Amino acid sequence: PGWVPTIRKGRISVKRFPREADDYPPLYEASDPVPLPDAMAEGKLPMITIGRYGSLHFPDDTANPSDSAIVAMLKSAQKSIKMSLQDLGPLAVPPPLGPKAIPTGVWPKDYLREIASAIYERGVDVHICLSNPNSIPADLSMTDANYGNGWSCEDVASEIVKAIQEHFPDAEEDRLTGLVGVNLRVAYLRGSCGDMDWQERGKAGNHAKFFIVDDIAYYVGSQNLYIANLAEWGIIVDSEEQTQKVLDEYWNKLWGSSFEDVAEEERDCNVDNVLAGRELDRNPMDASEYTDEELEAMLLAQQGSGMGGPKGVLTVWLKRAKNLRDADGAGGGSSDSYVKLRIVDENGRTVCHTHQSKVMTDGGANPHWNEQFTFEGLAAPCSYTLKLSVLDKDSLFGLDGKVADWLALEDKLGAASVDLGTLSNTRTFQDMELVIADGWFVDSTISIGLNTHGGWGN
């Protein structure tokens, strides 16, 4: 329970449980589709699943189909778009130094374009409920959790108005003024949640990823509409009846407490401030232009939002090996290869839990493991070395396990190491192919990817 005193607060990472579970979920077995009218008559809801791979997949044009689906939904709006989101803008340097977008942080131009077009061309009403800027729940710190990227409602509204002007350069000022506060309304999340309520602490955070189009269909899932380039999944529920239930049970109450029931003079978007805010450049500067204090504030904000990644964590993606020699010899079958992974300090001492891959029984010269292992609690990762040993499970007269590994060091299939101080600070996997054994004609190699999760590195 949260009230139990602890030495320090931290996060828990969930690994495979139970350990004897299969490596992969069972394959989906397709059945004959039920005609849509029959399915709806049975009380089933028409839904479309959408997702994206983010930085896990290349090329980009096939990696993120859910982005295109969201654009299509916004483009289809004829009457209303209702959004409950953490933010629309990128992660920003928090006050008092900001808000300024972090380097590489960009505004979602495709979404802003469709919202702008819906408002200006079709007169669509756009209502957006956002987190309070830099919302930190309860008694947590910025590095524990941060559910607001740092932008005000007026910042977001100004960027939408700028998108209208970009795509409709002949838009008249009087009309733009009329659209703000009538068609475009943006509010912070408010409620009645006790001493952590908006009115008391200004901490109400909105972690929803949800929007409704024309009160007939809605999206709910894991994908934020600000750009994070993560792997995400969600569903579009294409049912007016179900959407009405969601409106009654969720949205109408949310928007009522956040906007409709708020006195006009206390609302979060002032028309004059929104229009004046068009002069501000909220796009990121070059990293060299930020001060040390701003860079430090960015790192803290990234860590709290989950975008900066935890410190002291390394994920190893063990992919495959090539040209392994046959340790079993003639008549013994092909090698049953597996890999041991450990991290050592400058004195060669193991610093954390050792991992071992699955055994590729009769895996041959080119086994594919395709497994990921996470090392946590690395105090000084840049000073450590990752060591990989490729072994044959029965490489010594039928013996296996630790005994064989100890007695038959010469029968190891190969080994390699990586100086972790050479890794970059990034959330993407850094791929490398390592030579594990020299051969007469061709070397034995192992392919891996290393990910520091944006928490450490150069």
Image (spheres, grey):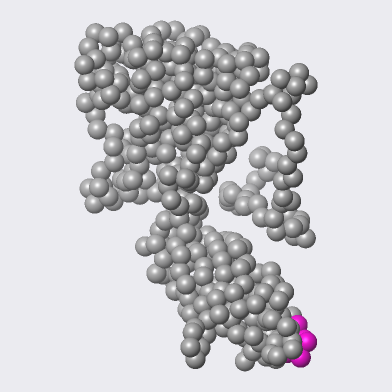
Task: Reply above or below: 404 against 299.
Answer: below
* Nearer to me, 287 or 301: 287
Q: Quadrant of residue 88?
A: top left
Can you give x and y, in whole percent of width and height, for residue 104 in the image? 33, 45
Picture residue at 25% right of the left edge, 43% below the top: 285
Regarding residue 395, the answer to whether it shows in the image is: yes
Can you give x and y, in whole percent of width and height, for residue 188 in the image? 46, 22
Q: Horizontal placement of 243 versus 301: left or right? A: right
Regarding residue 378, the answer to whether it shows in the image is: no
Q: Quadrant of residue 16?
A: bottom right
- Give the quarter of the figure containing the C terminus: bottom left
Q: Horizontal placement of 202 versus 154: left or right? A: right
Can you give x and y, in whole percent of width and height, for residue 14 in the image? 65, 52
Q: Is 153 included in the stretch rendered in magenta?
A: no
Q: Quadrant of residue 264?
A: top left
Picture residue at 35% right of the left edge, 42% below the top: 105
Counting labels gives: 0
Task: Reply above or below: 125 against 110.
Answer: above
Can you give x and y, in whole percent of width and height, for residue 60 in the image? 42, 47
Picture residue at 41% right of the left edge, 65% below the top: 423
Span colored in magenta? 396-400
Majority secondary structure in the magenta region: loop
Q: Horizontal placement of 417 versus 31: left or right? A: left
- Give the quarter of the figure containing the N terminus: top right
Q: Horizontal placement of 19 versus 229: left or right? A: right
Task: Reply above or below: 404 against 376.
Answer: below
